Amino acid sequence: MNRTNLASILLFTASISPAQVTFDRILNSSKEPQNWLTYSGDYSGRRFSTLDQINVDNVKSLAAKWVYQTGATGKFETTPLVVDGILYGTAPDDRAFALDARTGRPIWLYQRQLPGDLRPCCGRVNRGLAILGDKVFMGTLDAHMLALDAKTGNVVWDVSAVDYTQGYSFTPAPLAVKNQVVIGVAGGEYGIRGFIDAYDAETGKRNWRFYTVPGRGEPGQETWEGESYKTGGAAAWITGVYDPTTNLIFWPTGNPSPSNRGQGRAGDNLYSNTLLALDADTGKLKWHFQFTHHDEHDWDSTEVPVIIDQGDKHLIVQANRNGYFYVIDRTNGKLLSATPFGKVTWSDHKDAEGRPIATKESSPTLEGRFVCPGASGVTNWMSPTFNPVTGLFYVNIREQCDVFSTAPQPYEAGHAFYGSAYIPAPQGEPYSGALRAIDPATGDIKWEFKHPSPTWSGVLSTGGGLVFSADAEGNFIAFDARSGKPLWHFQTGSGAIAAPMSYAVDGKQYVAIATGSALYTFTLP
Amino acid sequence: MPPKVVRLLLLGTVLFAQERNPVAGDPKSAQAGEFQFRINCSFCHGLGARGGGRGPDLTLARKRHGASDVEMFHNIKDGIAGTAMPAAIGSIGVGMTDEEIWQVVTYLRSVQVKTPAKPPGNAANGKDAFFGSAKCFACHMVQGKGGRLGPDLTGTGSSRSLESIVESIRDPNRRLAAGLTEATKAFPQEYETATVVTAEGKTITGVTLNEDSFTVQIMDPAEKIYLLDKDKLRSFKKTRTSLMPAYATSQLSDKDLADIVAYLMSVEAK
């Protein structure tokens, strides 16, 4: 190679600019496996990368490539996006950043100026961005939607969704669909009225809003006792998925409010703990499936649902916080199976549709009742993964039971509205965690890897025959997807509260995960 | 801007106005406080504020970090440095407003036991037994004296309830003591017992200081620390049977037990 050619290549590399991320590109994300275009990697929620440069044979040589320190304290929950060599992520307190994905050096940084009177329930967290066109999108703790210029991080538009002082906030990564960005609200601990919003990506104009608790006279309001629907909760704080063939957005919802006290809100409490199928263009409800009727254990169904096709079956599956693995026909919302994938004591029978139903004895009392799983669930919002090559669904589980008791509270706007308390089991039972591989066709557990204590890490699977996850003890681990054997690990120094992802730049595959306050990446040497 | 003296006076007025329990003695506030307590505090201090293995009994009149309403308010609002007690805003639950914290203080006042619960034993005798006949010191340290195999008990009297200390002596396997607590882990390491056989065939039994999926740290009864890779061991077994003996009344009379507990409750952390 002569000097001129080398110089022109360097110049080309140095002047790389963010390309337009069209809806079409996200639809066809499998054609550009080097990029990670949505929170879960694509529209299906599979968190599966076809990249196979790092594989079962060479993963033992995997080594840290770069580490980006955010400088932020608090739970670092982001899954970064990567587009054409640039990585986009978020950090606690609504920071956003764009990095050179090869080196971790920042291109721009954005810090939201947040009001001083925020009281977000569960940490000042943010789980990531959406990208569409030349913008990235972030929901904020003060319940605004922002569009940032992907080149500079400058605010292009800033729209207030709702009054944050009433307990509303945005924490999940939005989902870009067609010409809009979709996001669900958090605040199930404040007796909010949950909703899912879609904003025009160009202008920030709200295209539609779906309230997850029906208003007066609307279908479903009869599932709430008296006026209880007014403080019904049903937040929607995890990123949903999209099925282009039916143009449906599938978005799961959280607990009814107050979370552990069902007294005063008799009924099924729609659409709490429900998988919603919404028309992407209008936000109109096509069907719904409620996982837990009248939940009294804070078992939000805010776990990422995963679209799976098996032959002529068009499925959507979810490993639910209540301990059951649900397989649903996504064309009509019909339940096909519900199988426990961890320790469950709250249900001993199913209804005519096959849905597990709570026993009377699981209902919390003032004195407290021992129920499995505990309030954190058999799993939680940490992402699972589905690997179409092995046909297995991988999810981190917790074995932890709690004593659930009630704590009646009057509703006051913007104040905590739990109605509940839960404490660890007094028996001093050991807690544990595990990574489990589930056959979605049968619900059978094919293998498990026990963690010393439960982890909040999500899971990634790859075309290299690998599953990546982290434990609460700080290890980032690569497993053989078929056997569950750990093949490699790296001590990051902090338990992970985020899910791994993978991308490639200049022909080199990277695996990334956020732990502590740092984003780690790994490559082969 | 007013002159400095005036500003100080103004500041003083404001502080004075805030630094009084505005709902002291109000039964309605005490009840609201009880529910706030259940939601935000019972995880460590128990549903009735009587403490447990994670947090002290708050019904006692004597409180290590201050027993006045204002001191309690600040302990709740700001947390207590150097202890597991977090600030009310931030890391746990949804946080509490000042008003809600005053309600909790009022609730704690309402459940305070009238006669300060003095441990029934004799602390001086307990100290003798701890460092003498009962041989607690062989494994436990108090104020810098004693062994290192078990937890340091210097602060245990102020961080746990009397009942939980008694239980730990009579039935230590029921709830293993918590050891190393890492900021980013949901649960602390517990004092489990591990037995390993090394590649060289050496058998080591000791307490687990820390463990992850790939490594384990063990201290044997001679206080030797082993840093081990699990994949290099011939065998690795862990049990929830503590190395701490269960002291039945035949080994430790109720009187000696009461004395030792009284001693532990009397010890001040330095």
Image (tube, coloured by chain):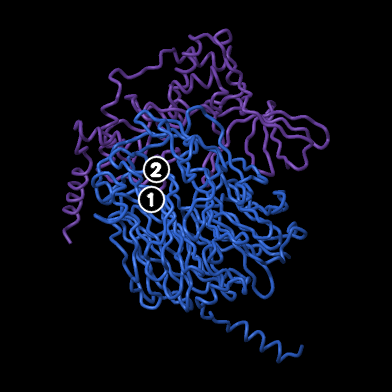
Q: Residue at x 20, y 30 (%)?
A: B25
Q: Which residue is at the far right? A: B200
> Which chain corresponds to the colour blue?
A
Q: Residue furthest bottom?
A: A4
Whether tag 2 and tag 1 are in contact, CB under 8 A, the answer is: yes
Q: Which residue is mark 2?
A: A295
Task: List the residue tagged with mark 1.
Answer: A272
Considering only order in the chain, which callout, 1 or 2, is on the residue closer to the N terminus? 1
Q: Is residue B118 something one can see in this rendering?
A: yes
Q: Pointer 2: residues within 10 angstroms few (<14), some, or many (20+)?
A: many
Counting other residues with Cα less than 10 Å from the Cα at mark 1, is it few (<14), some (14-19), or many (20 or more)?
Answer: many
Relative placement, left or right, of A22 versus B66 is right
- Of B187 and A298, nearer the camera is A298
Label 2, label 1: how far apart the Cα atoms are: 8 Å
Of the pair B14 and A369, the residue shown nearer to us: A369
**Residue beneath the point at 56% across and 33% down:** A430
Q: Chain of mark 1?
A: A
User: Residue A108, image x and y in percent?
Assistant: 49, 73
Instruction: Indicate the amino acid at tag 1.
Output: Ser
Q: Specify the farthest residue to the front.
A: A352
Q: Position of residue A183 (x, y in %)?
A: 41, 63
Residue B270 appears in the rendering = no
Helix, strand or loop status at disc 1: loop
